[in-house]
Image: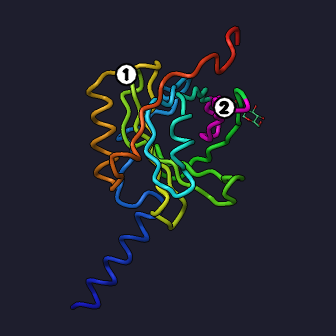
C-alpha cells in the first residue's frame, strides 16, 4: 500500500512536470496577453542578487509578440549602470496553454515560465524556474502600465510569500528613466 502511494505520488509529480504545483491561468489567451508590459515587481531570492543590484533595480519594459505557431517573441528593456539594454527572448510553447520554456544563455539552462494569473488589461503574475530545480524560482509582476493598483501589489506579495520568498526578496522597483529611450 505504501509503495503504491509513493508510486502514484511520483507519477503525479512527473505528470505535473514543468510547472510543479502551480497551474497557469485558466483558458489562457495568448493573443490577449500580447503587447506591452512593465515588470513592476520582482521576487528573486538568490545569493547572486546582491543588495547593490536590488537598489539599482528599475521597472523593465517588455513587448510580447506571439508567433503564429504559439511561441512568443519577447523584447525587454532593462536599465543597467551601463545604460539601457534590450534583450530578445523566444519563449517556446508547451502542451499547456500559459506554460512556456526558454533556454537561458546566461545560465545555460532551460527555464520554465508559467503565467499564473492575469486579467490581460491590468496585471500578470508570472513564475519562472529552472527545470527540475525549485530553488531558483522567480516571481514577477507585470503591469500594463508602470503603476498598478495596491491590491494587485498585495496579490503579488501574497503569492511570493506563499512561494517561500522572504520579505526583503520581494521588490517593487521605481520607474526607469528613459529606458527604453523616448521616441521609440
Ligand atoms: C520572432 O523572432 C523571430 C526570430 O528573430 C523572427 O524571425 C520572427 O519574425 C519574429 N516573429 C514575430 C511575430 O515577432
Badge 1 vs badge 2, beta-carbon distance below 8 Å? no
State yes or no: residue 74 in magenta.
yes
Pointer 1 local density, CA inside 10 Å: few below 14, some 14–19, many at least 20: some
Which residue is nearer to you in this view: 27 or 43? 43
What residue occupies the far front of the structure in this picture? 52
**Horizontal arrangement in the rendering, residue 156 relative to residue 109 (left or right):** left
Query: Depth check: 37 or 32 in front?
Result: 37
Residue, x 31% and y 76% (percent of image)? 9
Q: Which badge, 1 or 2, is on the more N-terminal residue?
A: 2
* Residue denoted by label 1: 148
Instruction: Return the residue found at the far left.
Output: 1
Which residue does the image show at 31% across and 21% down from the upper left? 149
In terms of image quadrants, where is residue 152?
Answer: top left
Q: Is residue 14 magenta?
A: no
In the rendered image, which quarter contains the N terminus?
A: bottom left
Find residue 48 and report its horizontal and vertical position in percent. 57, 55
Residue pictured at 43% horizontal, 45% vertical: 43
Residue at which label 2 appears: 75
Callout 2 crowding tier (Cα within 10 Å): few <14, some 14–19, many ≥20 = some
Query: In the figure, 138 relative to 117: above or below?
Result: below
Local secondary structure at mark 2: strand
- Magenta segment: 65-82
Who's the residue at 44% across and 25% down the image?
Answer: 143
Residue 90 percent across, percent down from the top left? 67, 42
- Viewer-proximal residue among 15 and 89: 89
Image side of residue 100 versus residue 17, left or right = right
Marks counted in the figure total 2
Q: Is residue 4 left or right of residue 139?
A: left
State how far apart marks 1 and 2 are (Cα): 21 Å
Answer with the quadrant where ligand 1 appears in the image. top right
Locate residue 53: give its quadrant: top right
Amino acid at each position: 500500500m505504501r509503495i503504491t502511494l509513493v508510486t502514484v505520488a511520483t507519477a503525479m509529480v512527473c505528470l505535473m512536470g514543468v510547472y510543479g504545483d502551480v497551474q497557469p491561468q485558466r483558458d489562457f489567451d495568448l493573443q490577449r496577453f500580447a503587447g506591452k508590459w512593465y515588470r513592476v515587481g520582482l521576487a528573486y531570492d538568490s545569493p547572486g542578487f546582491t543588495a547593490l543590484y536590488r537598489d539599482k533595480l528599475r521597472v523593465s519594459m517588455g513587448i510580447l509578440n506571439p508567433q503564429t505557431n504559439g511561441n512568443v517573441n519577447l523584447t525587454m528593456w532593462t536599465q543597467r549602470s551601463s545604460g539601457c539594454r534590450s534583450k530578445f527572448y523566444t519563449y517556446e510553447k508547451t502542451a499547456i496553454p500559459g506554460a512556456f520554456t526558454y533556454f537561458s544563455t546566461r545560465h545555460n539552462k532551460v527555464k520554465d515560465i508559467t503565467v499564473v494569473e492575469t486579467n490581460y488589461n491590468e496585471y500578470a503574475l508570472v513564475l519562472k524556474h529552472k527545470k527540475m530545480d525549485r530553488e531558483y524560482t522567480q516571481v514577477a509582476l507585470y503591469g500594463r502600465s508602470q503603476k498598478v493598483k495596491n491590491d494587485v501589489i498585495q496579490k503579488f506579495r501574497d503569492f511570493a510569500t506563499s512561494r517561500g520568498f522572504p520579505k526583503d526578496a520581494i521588490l517593487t522597483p521605481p520607474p526607469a528613466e528613459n529606458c527604453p529611450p523616448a521616441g521609440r
